[in-house]
Amino acid sequence: MMATQLLLAAGVTGLAVNSMLAHPMLWPMFACTAESAAFQGVDWAARRASLRRLVPPADLAAALSLQSAAFQVTLVVGPAAAGLLIAHAGFSLVYWLNVAAFAIAFGTVARLPSLRPAGGGQPAGAASLAGGVRYLRSSPPLAGAFLIDLGAMVFGMPRALFPALAVTLYGGGAATVGYLNAAPGLGALAGSLLTGHVWRVRRAGRSVAVCVAIWGLAIMGFGFVPWLPAALALLVVAGAADVISSVFRMMIVQQVTPDAIQGRVNSLIFVGLQGGPRLGDAEAGAAAALAGPQFAAWSGGLLSVVAAVVTCWAIPQFWRYRNETGLAHGAGEGPGQAAAPGTPPAGEPAGRAGNPGEARPEPGPADAGHPARPEPGPAG
């Protein structure tokens, strides 16, 4: 992470220096932006992989919720603050402030303890990445979380349709496009503030499926309604469902992935997060060319719901996956003492612990004579 902070800062420094020239050049903007984008994935995967080494297992859900809320706040506040600063002081100040932020981040990361993965990890390369792919395919809950999110992004992402819908359906212009783009972010910000108690929910796989279904139904409704306020409200609901789903998905990733391959698996997740929306833009454009933007929107929402149902049917272990954080809340290891893969959570008999990536079985008729473990709450 220290290296990525330096490399990301180098890209922004290039942009800052270029903006101070009397005649800023075009090629540094492309080169520096590409350099920063190339290392963002490495930085994201490293930060996600380190989380389990820094946070007790019982507090993973809360940490992910806090990360999500902070990220959504920066998405809303950052562009607005940058716009105001650019209007009054120009681009250079904004770039140099970004460089200073990376310097602060570097100093913070330098204070962290050594975060070597359990088992020593593996050197970066094609073989290690292939190992991450193999593990993702072999872990039903992890594969389900990856596929259900990919289906939602590919089929239910209506972002590319906003300009056409703003003009043809809502009779607006650039301001209407701005409202449509802002609505999911507003919903995501609101949803992130509601995720502080997700640790109470034990059925994480089922929760992801429900959130994705809400996302798809909201996008489907968005494709049908011709009234702009109702369309914006549906996009807010979709954004909230998406961010809550993302917290549950990352909980599953953290819990079922061995520490030694956390980085590789999180890299694959990042690829899906970056590539899925781009594929979604292409799918939406193709559907709009076939039958119009409204058809592309509602059919995409419908297909994302269908993809979620098919994923849960094809990978029942994902649907039945039980979140262990609720069972271990208030107990567990301290920072830097992550549980070894396959170690039963606190309070769980060793005979009932599953392997990493293995879903907990649902109680069946054979359990009828035994007292049921009390549920943490109605959402569980």
Image: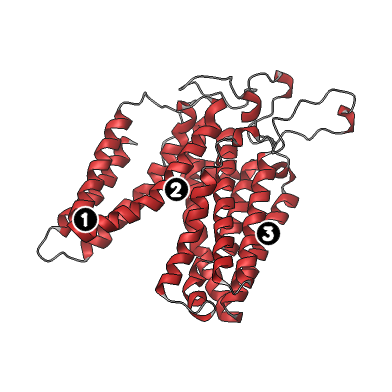
Q: Is residue 287 above or below residue 355?
A: below
Residue at 42%, 37% (x, y): give it. 47
How packed is label 1: few (under 14 Cα within 10 Å), some, or many (20 or more)? many
What residue would you read off at disc 2?
A: 72
Between 160 and 186, the one lying in front of the other is 186
Mark identifier at residue 305 = 3
Query: Quick one: label 1 or label 3, which is nearer the N terminus?
Result: 1
In the rendered structure, the answer to whether residue 357 lies left or right of residue 118 reads: right
CA distance for labels 2 and 1: 25 Å
In the rendered structure, the answer to whether residue 165 lies left or right of residue 359 reads: left
CA distance for labels 1 and 3: 42 Å
Query: Quick one: label 2 or label 3, which is nearer the N terminus?
Result: 2
Give how far across and how far down residue 328 sits, in percent: 62, 24
Residue type at numbered disc 3: Val
Q: Does residue 90 appear in the picture of this structure? A: no
Q: Secondary structure at mark 3?
A: helix
Mark identifier at residue 15 = 1
- Mark 2 and 1 residues: CB-CB less than 8 Å, in contact? no
Q: Does residue 197 appear in the picture of this structure? A: yes
Q: Is residue 189 above or below residue 340?
A: below
Q: Quadrant of residue 112?
A: top left
Residue type at numbered disc 2: Gln
Between 139 and 277, the one lying in front of the other is 277
How packed is label 2: few (under 14 Cα within 10 Å), some, or many (20 or more)? many
Residue type at numbered disc 1: Leu
In the rendered structure, the answer to whether residue 43 lies left or right of residue 90 reads: right
